[in-house]
Image (spheres, rainbow, N blue to C red):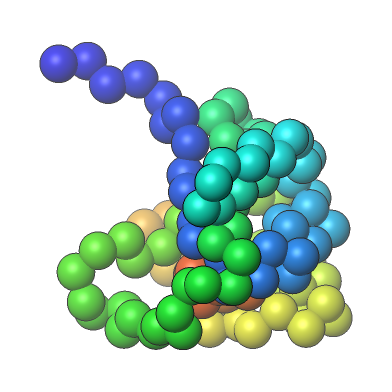
């Protein structure tokens, strides 16, 4: 088996307008097309290294649900960036919930920042020390 790069990441949204604004206006991803299906819509965003992010809009039918970090399943999405501390400032100014402020992890040779998207998905920005 030979696995290639990530094709897409899919996120169920609580509010498609808020989620689109976050990924487009705050994180700066390029918004692509929206595809309509009978039960839901998919809005696409280009990821910088290829592939795409799909936001699922179930037109408000998604149940409010939270998940603890230590539960099985997806824990977070991580993106490489430069200037983690400056990104933290920008995110705070935009009202984004920071769950781990800029922190150096010498064991990993990284500086990281964790924050939540509007759906409660944890996103990590990381850069090399």
Give the answer, above or below, for where 61 lies relative to 7: below
Whether residue 44 is visible: no
Residue drawn 35% across and 20% down? 4
> Depth check: 67 or 106 in front?
67
Residue drawn 41% across and 63% down? 76
Whether residue 84 is visible: yes
Query: Along the horizontal axis of the image, is 67 left or right of 91?
Result: left
Give the answer, above or below, for where 95 lies relative to 47: below
Query: Along the horizontal axis of the image, is 94 left or right of 33?
Result: right
Q: Residue furthest top?
A: 2
Q: In which quarter of the image is residue 87?
A: bottom right
Q: Quadrant of the N terminus?
A: top left
Residue drawn 54% across and 46% down? 38
Query: Along the horizontal axis of the image, is 90 left or right of 71?
Result: right
Coordinates of residue 103 in the picture (x, y in percent): 53, 75
Q: Quadrant of residue 19?
A: bottom right
Coordinates of residue 52 in the picture (x, y in percent): 58, 35
Coordinates of residue 12 in the picture (x, y in percent): 49, 61
């Amino acid at each position: 088996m030979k696995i290639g790069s990530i094709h897409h990441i899919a996120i169920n949204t609580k509010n498609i307008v808020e989620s689109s604004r976050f990924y487009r206006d705050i994180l700066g991803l390029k918004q692509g097309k929206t595809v309509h299906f009978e039960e839901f819509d998919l809005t696409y965003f280009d990821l910088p290294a290829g592939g795409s992010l799909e936001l699922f809009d179930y037109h408000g039918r998604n149940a409010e649900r939270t998940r603890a970090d230590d539960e099985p399943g997806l824990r977070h999405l991580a993106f490489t960036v430069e200037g983690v501390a400056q990104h933290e400032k920008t995110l705070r100014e935009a009202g984004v919930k920071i769950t781990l402020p800029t922190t150096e992890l010498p064991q990993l040779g990284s500086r990281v920042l964790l924050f939540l998207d509007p759906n409660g998905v944890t996103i990590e920005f990381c850069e090399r020390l």
